[in-house]
Amino acid sequence: MTNSNKDRPTNITDSLANRTLIVTTILEDPYVMYKKSDKPLYGNDRFEGYCLDLLKELSSILGFIYEVKLVSDGKYGAQNDKGEWNGMVKELIDHKADLAVAPLTITYVREKVIDFSKPFMTLGISILYRKPNGTNPGVFSFLNPLSADIWMYVLLACLGVSCVLFVIARFTPYEWYNPHPCNPDSDVVENNFTLLNSFWFGVGALMQQGTAVTLHSCTYPTV
């Protein structure tokens, strides 16, 4: 990570040759660690780890000299409510360091103020959720598409239509018939549209199925 994204030279190799860069980093195993030794160590020899090996390889390729320093506040770099930064990001912004080599996460907010190189570490962060347990559908699972209130309203509407059909069947002469066709002079007449048959007819119409009860009056299609 660098502290500026302006006025970049065309040839990066020539621009860094024989330059001394201040590199800020943070202790994080196994990327940056203190080197264990029986004798005192100074400068860059105090540290070891993957980031130090990477920095050494870059130095040999690009020809620059580097001086590793630990970040003063021991933080990676975050922005507070006032827009101020801390950690390694702040040292890059304030030009206290030319380069930061550390396991620093690339975020949108950080990319606004510093430049990131190609990442050498992939965390594989993902969202985990519990796998739903498979359940067998119940007997009344066909009712799930609609709420209980909707089904209640449908039932009440069916009952209401059935009552209207029953009342109309009582008044219209077309639904009364002679149960004994062989005796045309009989005074006994019947009506198929009882309250139960009216309800059954309404259910059949709702389900778009036919019933044994037939209509003889043109008033019913209107209902």
Image: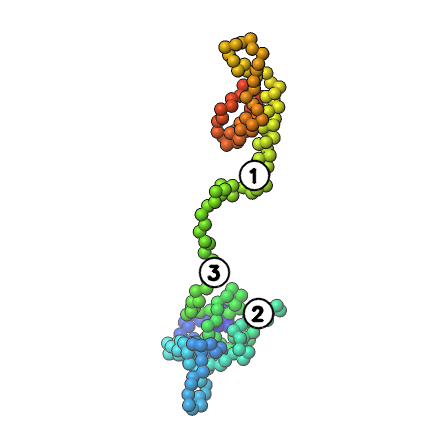
For label 1, the crowd category at 10 Å Cα-Cα, with few meaning under 14, some 14 to 19 and many 20 or more, is: few
Residue at image coords 41%, 70%: 120
Q: Please name the residue that numbered disc 3 is placed on.
A: 127
Mark 3: amino acid: Ile
* First in sequence: mark 2 vs mark 1: 2
The first of marks 3 and 2 along the sequence is 2
Q: Which corner quadrant holds the C terminus? A: top right
Q: Is residue 65 above or below residue 82?
A: below
Q: Which is more foreground, mark 3 or mark 2?
A: 3
The residue beneath circle 1 is 151
Q: Secondary structure at mark 2?
A: loop
As measured in the structure, the alpha-carbon distance from the residue carrying label 3 to the one carrying label 1 is: 38 Å
Horizontally, is 187 left or right of 123 in the view? right
Whether residue 131 is visible, yes or no, is yes
Is residue 93 left or right of 31 when viewed as pictured?
right
Work out whether residue 180 or residue 1 is closer to the camera in this orientation and state it: 180
Q: Residues within 10 Å of mark 3 (few under 14, many from 20)?
A: few
- In front of the other: 193 or 120: 193
Instruction: Say which residue label 2 marks.
Output: 79
Q: Which percent across, then down, holds residue 51?
A: 42, 76
Give percent across and percent down for residue 129: 47, 58
